[in-house]
C-alpha cells in the first residue's frame, strides 16, 4: 500500500491552485480523476458555455445591424463551426500534460472511494495519505418525473454534444443554466419554452432584477411558464411531450428536445464518505469548518462539494484558504463576500446581499438605482436594457451589495467586490475618478440618489 503526502481527489479548478503550491515542495502527490481532467468548468461549464454565448451574441448583433446603419446579408448559423470553435476552446490537454509531466505526481485515471480514514481505493490499488483534498464537484439534479427516462433528456453536459440546433427546446428550470442555454439556442434559431415552478425566475435574486431579466429574454422571443410543474413526460412524434400543471390546469407542451436544469447535487454519494468519518449535511454536501477542514482529521473538501459556493472562483478561493491555513494564515470561508455572474446578454453581476436579504438581516438599507437607458455610453452602444442597483448600510456607510444588469455587468461588479473586500465606504467610492465614456463611470454618480428602502 503506497502512502502519499498529499492526495487530491478530483481535478476541478481548486486542484490547479493546490498543485501550483504543492508541486515546488517536492512532496509526493497523488491525483485521482475518474472523469475528464479539468472538472466542470473546462469541460461542461464556464469555458464551453461562454464560447457558445459569444457565438450567439454575434448572431444577435448581426440581426440588429440595421439599427446601427449596417446592412448584413442575413444570418445563417453554421452549427458545426460553432461546435468546433467551442471544442477548440475547451481543450483540457494543458492541465492534463502539466499533471502527467510532474515528477512528484502520480495520476490515477479512475474513480476513488474511501475505504477508511485517509485511505482510498482507486482501481485495483489502495493508497493512503497524510492529507487528502476532496474536489469531487457536483452534477445535474435529476427530478423524479414519470416518463423522464422514456425520452432522451438533456442536462448541462449532454446538451453540449448536440450536433444540430433544436427546433423547439423545452427547458425545465428558470435559473442560471436554464436561462443561459435558453438565450444561446434562441439566438441560434430555436424556439424556447422555459418551465419554472416558482413565481419568478432566478429565485435567489430580488424581484425587480428577476423581472427585468424576464423582460429582456421575452423581447428575444423566449416563452415562460411560471408557477408550473412538469407532471408527466412522454415520447412524441415531434420529440417529447411535457405535461405541465399551471394554475390548476393541465396542458401539454411538445418540443423536439428537453433540457433539465433544476439545480445541482454534490458527488459525495460516490465517495463512501462514512468510511472515512466524513460528515455530510442533509443535502449531501460535505460539512467543513471555516478552513475547509472536514470532520475527518487531515481531510479537506473544496469546491462545489462543500456547499459554500458553486463557482470556479469560489473553488479556487477554497484552495487558497487551505493553503493559507497550512502556512499559518487566517483566511477563512466566513470572510468571503459572495460575487457571481449570470451570463445572459446583457449579463448580471452580483455581489454581497440582495435587497431582500439586507432588509431581513435588519440593516438600515439605502438604495440607489440607474437604468442603462439613462447612461450615455449604453445609448452609444445600443445596449440600453437592464439597470444598476447599489445598496448601502445607512449606519456604517459600507456597501451591502450591488446588482449590475447591463453591458459589462459581469466586469463592473468586480469593482464593487474589491471595494467591499477592502472595507471602503460608499463615500470613498464616490470620490473615484473613472474613465469616460464608460458604463462604470456612472456608478459613483448613481450613489447621489441613495434613499432609504
Image (spheres, helix red, strand yellow):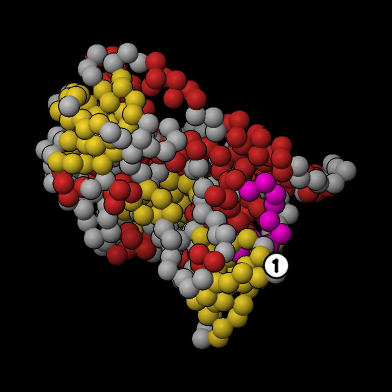
Q: Nearer the viewer, residue 30 or 425?
A: 30
Residue receiving disc 1: 238
Residue 420 in which image quadrant: top left
Residues 205 and 326: in front is 326
Q: Residue at x 73, y 54 (%)?
A: 189
The x, y position of residue 426, in whole percent, is 37, 44
Left or right of 304, for residue 212 = right
Residue under the point 20% across and 30% down: 127
Residue 438 vertical position relative to residue 245 in the rendered view, above or below:
above
- Considering every residue shown, the one lying at the far front of the view is 124
Secondary structure found at label 1: loop
Magenta span includes 286: no
**How many numbered marks are there?**
1
* Quadrant where the image shows the N terminus: top left
Is residue 387 something one can see in this rendering?
Answer: no
Image quadrant of residue 32?
top left
One can see residue 401 in this view:
yes
Which segment is the magenta one?
162-170
Q: Main secondary structure of the magenta part?
A: loop
Q: Position of residue 444 (x, y in %)?
A: 47, 43
**In the rendered image, the vertical position of residue 200 relative to residue 7, given as above or below:** below
Check disc 1: other Cα within 10 Å, few if <14, some if 14-19, many if 20+.
few
Q: Quadrant of the C terminus?
A: bottom left
Is residue 10 found left or right of 276 in the rendered image? Answer: right
Amino acid at each position: 500500500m503506497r502512502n502519499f503526502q498529499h492526495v487530491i481527489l478530483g481535478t476541478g479548478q481548486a486542484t490547479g491552485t493546490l498543485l501550483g503550491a504543492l508541486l515546488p515542495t517536492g512532496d509526493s502527490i497523488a491525483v485521482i480523476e475518474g472523469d475528464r481532467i479539468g472538472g466542470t468548468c473546462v469541460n461542461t461549464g464556464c469555458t464551453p458555455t461562454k464560447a457558445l454565448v459569444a457565438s450567439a451574441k454575434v448572431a444577435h448583433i448581426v440581426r440588429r445591424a440595421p439599427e446601427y446603419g449596417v446592412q448584413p446579408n442575413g444570418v445563417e448559423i453554421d452549427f458545426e463551426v460553432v461546435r468546433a470553435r467551442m471544442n477548440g476552446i475547451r481543450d483540457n490537454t494543458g492541465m492534463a500534460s502539466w499533471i502527467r509531466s510532474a515528477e512528484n505526481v502520480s495520476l490515477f485515471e479512475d474513480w476513488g472511494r474511501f475505504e477508511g480514514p485517509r485511505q482510498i481505493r482507486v482501481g485495483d490499488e489502495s493508497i493512503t495519505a497524510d492529507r487528502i483534498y476532496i474536489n469531487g464537484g457536483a452534477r445535474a439534479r435529476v427530478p423524479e418525473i414519470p416518463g423522464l427516462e422514456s425520452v432522451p433528456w438533456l442536462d448541462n453536459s449532454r446538451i453540449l454534444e448536440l450536433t444540430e440546433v433544436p427546433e423547439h427546446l423545452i427547458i425545465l428550470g428558470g435559473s442560471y443554466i436554464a436561462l443561459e442555454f435558453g438565450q444561446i439556442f434562441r439566438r441560434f434559431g430555436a424556439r424556447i419554452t422555459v418551465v419554472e415552478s416558482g413565481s419568478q425566475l432566478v429565485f435567489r435574486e430580488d424581484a425587480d432584477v428577476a423581472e427585468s431579466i424576464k423582460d429582456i429574454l421575452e423581447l428575444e422571443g423566449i416563452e415562460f411558464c411560471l408557477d408550473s410543474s412538469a407532471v408527466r413526460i412522454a415520447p412524441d412524434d415531434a420529440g417529447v411531450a411535457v405535461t405541465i400543471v399551471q394554475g390548476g390546469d393541465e396542458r401539454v407542451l411538445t418540443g423536439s428536445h428537453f433540457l433539465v436544469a433544476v439545480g445541482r447535487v454534490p458527488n459525495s454519494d460516490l465517495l463512501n464518505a462514512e468510511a472515512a468519518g466524513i460528515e455530510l449535511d442533509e443535502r449531501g454536501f460535505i460539512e467543513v469548518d471555516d478552513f475547509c477542514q472536514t470532520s475527518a482529521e487531515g481531510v479537506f473538501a473544496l469546491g462545489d462539494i462543500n456547499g459554500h459556493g458553486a463557482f470556479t472562483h469560489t473553488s479556487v478561493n477554497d484552495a487558497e484558504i487551505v493553503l493559507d491555513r497550512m502556512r499559518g494564515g487566517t483566511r477563512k470561508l466566513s470572510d468571503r463576500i459572495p460575487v457571481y455572474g449570470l451570463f445572459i446578454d446583457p449579463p448580471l453581476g452580483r455581489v454581497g446581499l440582495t435587497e431582500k436579504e439586507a432588509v431581513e438581516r435588519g440593516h438600515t438599507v439605502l438604495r440607489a438605482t440607474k437604468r442603462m437607458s439613462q447612461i450615455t455610453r449604453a445609448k452609444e452602444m445600443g445596449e440600453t436594457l437592464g439597470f444598476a442597483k447599489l445598496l448601502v448600510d445607512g449606519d456604517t456607510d459600507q456597501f451591502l451589495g450591488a446588482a449590475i444588469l447591463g453591458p459589462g455587468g459581469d466586469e463592473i461588479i468586480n469593482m464593487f467586490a474589491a471595494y467591499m473586500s477592502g472595507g471602503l465606504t460608499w463615500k470613498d467610492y464616490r470620490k473615484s475618478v473613472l474613465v469616460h465614456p464608460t458604463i462604470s463611470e456612472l456608478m459613483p454618480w448613481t450613489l447621489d440618489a441613495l434613499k432609504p428602502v
